[in-house]
Image (cartoon, helix red, strand yellow):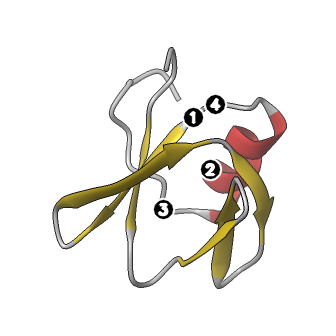
Amino acid sequence: MNNDKQMLTHHSHFQYHMKHEIPVQVYEQGIHISLGCITAVEPQFVEIEGMLFNRNSYTFISRPGY
């Protein structure tokens, strides 16, 4: 997870970001929607600071340092 613009695709990516409180940027069809830390993760959904996102509908980008 060294690249500051790595796309999260695997369940382990989401778990790692949640465990280490690494911020994640959320995009929907290329448009920035949200930025925050993952507070819960399941196979189909990700919770980022109280908001649920379907993992198949959004793109998640690692943003360490934010």
Q: Is residue 45 left or right of residue 39?
A: left
Q: First in sequence: mark 4 or mark 3? A: 3
Instruction: Find disc 3 in the rendering and name its residue.
Output: 9
Label 4: few (<14), some (14–19) or many (≥20) C-alpha neighbours in 10 Å: some
Q: CA distance from mark 4 to mark 2?
A: 10 Å
Pick whichever of labels 4 and 2 is earlier in the sequence: 2
Q: Is residue 5 left or right of residue 9?
A: left
Q: Amino acid at mark 4?
A: Ile
Q: Is residue 36 above or below residue 66?
A: below
Callout 2: few (<14), some (14-19), or many (20+) C-alpha neighbours within 10 Å?
some
Measure the alpha-carbon separation of dots 1 and 3: 15 Å
Which numbered disc, 4 or 2, marks the residue closer to the eye?
4
| Residue 53 in the image, given as x and y percentages of width and height | 55, 75
What residue appears at the point 51 percent right and 22 percent down from the top-left corner? 64
Residue 7 at x, y percent in the picture: 38, 49
- Closer to the chain start, of discs 1 and 3, is 3
Relative image position of residue 16 (x, y in whole percent): 73, 42
Which residue position is annotated with label 2? 13
Disc 2 residue type (three-letter): His
Q: Earlier in the sequence, mark 1 or mark 2?
A: 2
Residue located beneath label 1 in the image: 23
Q: Which residue is mark 4?
A: 22
Give the quadrant of residue 31. bottom left
